[in-house]
Amino acid sequence: MTALSIAIPVAACLFWLWVIARHDDHEREPWPLVALAIGLGAMATFGVLWTRPWLEHLLAPASAFVEAFVVTAAAEEAWKLLALLPLLLLREVDEPLDGAIYGVAVGLGFATAEDLWLAHPSPDLLVQLQRGATSSLVHAACSGCLGLCFAEGKLRPLGPWTAGWLLLGVAIAVGVHGGYDLFLDGDRAWALLALLVVLPLAIGLLAAKVHWARSRSHEFHPRP
């Protein structure tokens, strides 16, 4: 593994994090906690490496649908959620946008570690550049949705809507992630569908939820 093959995933992670975090202009999250989120996301890849062989054995022979939505999407989002939950309990998470920021950081940390794993021992720099512009954003969008919805569940009064927000976050994250992997692993036409439809949908989802959460920030941080 070369220095460049390490620098590309790390640079993609930091760039996309900057793009998202700069919208948090009411009360920025402490960078040490954001860095912790990236680290926890990276560590979540070890959980996936541990559980994936077990799931593949348990569900074998698995259809492409089960492989994409259960073995890959559900398992990866579950481990990213485990990495995210301690951060959501922090008192710094006092508006929905904070949950999205930490979720994005966890997702980008996961994507960076995943790209570094895939680059060992023979890195393909072009593939890394492509993944930095595609899969990194899918991970950021999915875990960012988890963070936003779980922060909503935390900040709202406990009630029926609490479970609704939690389930909504999981459903969107697994649905988008699974759909992307299902199409990407198909033939060329399906792979193009993943890149031209599912990826823009994930990016649009990420942008919409950040815009929506930012528009509500004044409710949690009233201007004097």
Image (cartoon, rainbow, N blue to C red):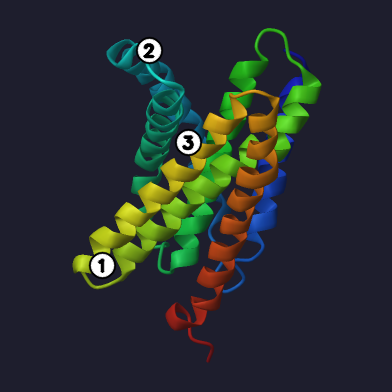
Residue at which label 1 appears: 161
Residue at which label 2 appears: 53
- How far, Cα to Cα, is label 1 from label 3? 25 Å
Q: Is residue 133 above or below residue 211?
A: above
Element type at marker 3?
helix
- Report the front residue among 132 and 176: 176
- Mark 2 residue crowding within 10 angstroms, few (<14) / some (14–19) / many (20+): few
- Mark 1 residue crowding within 10 angstroms, few (<14) / some (14–19) / many (20+): few
Residue 52: percent from left, percent from top? 39, 18
Residue 38: percent from left, percent from top? 54, 40
Q: Is residue 73 left or right of residue 6?
A: left
Q: Which badge, 1 or 3, comes first in the chain's sequence? A: 1
Can you tell which of label 3 and label 2 is closer to the viewer?
3
User: What amino acid is at disc 2?
Assistant: Pro
Residue 77: percent from left, percent from top? 41, 38
Residue at which label 3 appears: 178
User: What amino acid is at disc 3?
Assistant: Gly
Element type at marker 2?
helix
Q: Is residue 219 above or below residue 45?
A: below
Pointer 1 with pointer 3, Cβ within 8 A: no
User: What amino acid is at disc 1?
Assistant: Trp
Q: Is residue 51 left or right of residue 204?
A: left
Image point (34%, 12%), residue name: 60
Q: Which badge, 3 or 2, comes first in the chain's sequence? A: 2
